[in-house]
Image: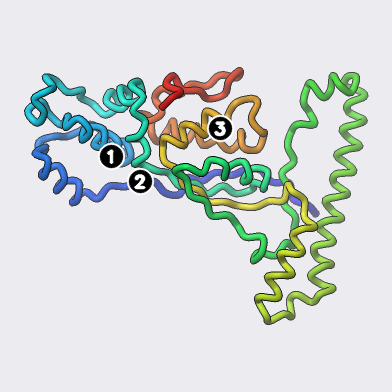
Amino acid sequence: MVELVAPRVHLIAQTNLNSGGMADFLGDVGATDWHTDTTNPAQYLIEVAGRLCYKAFGTRLNPNISKVREGNEGYIGNIIKSGHGSVLEHATCTFAVLGITPVFTHELVRHRVGTAFSQQSGRYVRIEDLGFFWPGALGDGALIDHLGGPSQSRAAIGLVSDKGDKLLEAMEEFQREFARLLRMDDITDFDLKKRLTSFQRRFAPYGLETSVIFTANHRMIRYMIGKRTSPHAEVEIAQVFNEIASKMEEDFPAIYQDMVYSEEFGYTFSAEHV
């Protein structure tokens, strides 16, 4: 029986600080008395990186400045407002995303600057049960209008869904028959098994379940959220990045302080160029 899946997002790692090294650095630049009001390592690091650019740990360190902005949220807010997004690149998050498909991952990897990806291998992991992401596009209002109204659309959508289910079940059965007929469980030559597994996956649907771990810096995450939560974004990637946006807003409020949500545009930022 084909299992319908939905994306599941886990924030599994994020930037941390080396407290000893940070203390040594602050001492080296003459800022031993400097402190900030955040305990969030990513936000702390971004503030430190920004202050280093202007030696703005205190007025006595740079004769060109007569005052410094206090408070982490205000400092990062000014960075965002000024468009100095490069300091956001120092801090990263790593996400594990399960229950997604190549439809998602092939769009995700287009964001290749400031990112890293590790995806479940289709050459090494044999398909047995098909997990399939079934998007909600068949319930779209524009499609219902196109088909002539609710009653006509229900009949057409029901037929498509039924044929789709039968096709998926046939493909799942083929995967098992493939392995049984070629006696793959008895193969001890892993290189041969790998080649057969790679051949086998060509008979799987494009919407087949997979998993990915990816890392991105906060400048890139902001960009991805802005692009991928738009109502015009592909439904699967939009679902993932709506969840990521919610996590970022909760865990890194200073970095995402200018992020707002609307049904018309999804998540947007007042400083789009950062």
Residue wearing tag 3: 242
Residue 39 as seen in the image, left or right of residue 197: left
Name the residue rendered at 52%, 34% in the picture: 224
Asked if disc 1 and disc 2 are in contact, CB closer than 8 Å, the reply is yes
Q: Position of residue 46 (x, y in %)?
A: 30, 36
Few, some or many residues within 10 Å of mark 2 (<14, 14–19, 20+): some
Task: Report the coloring of the rendering.
Answer: rainbow
Q: What's the residue type where badge 1 is placed? A: Leu
Name the mark on residue 15: 2
> Which of the pair 63/104 is nearer the observer?
63
Residue wearing tag 1: 45
Few, some or many residues within 10 Å of mark 1 (<14, 14–19, 20+): some
Earlier residue among tags 1 and 2: 2
Q: Position of residue 106 (x, y in %)?
A: 63, 45
Earlier residue among tags 3 and 2: 2
Q: In the rendered image of this protein, does residue 20 appear above or below residue 6?
A: below
Q: In the rendered image of this protein, does residue 95 appear above or below residue 201?
A: above
Which quadrant of the rendered structure holds the C terminus? top left
Per the model, the C-alpha gap separating discs 1 and 2 is: 9 Å
Per the model, the C-alpha gap separating discs 1 and 3 is: 25 Å
* Res 152 → quadrant: top right
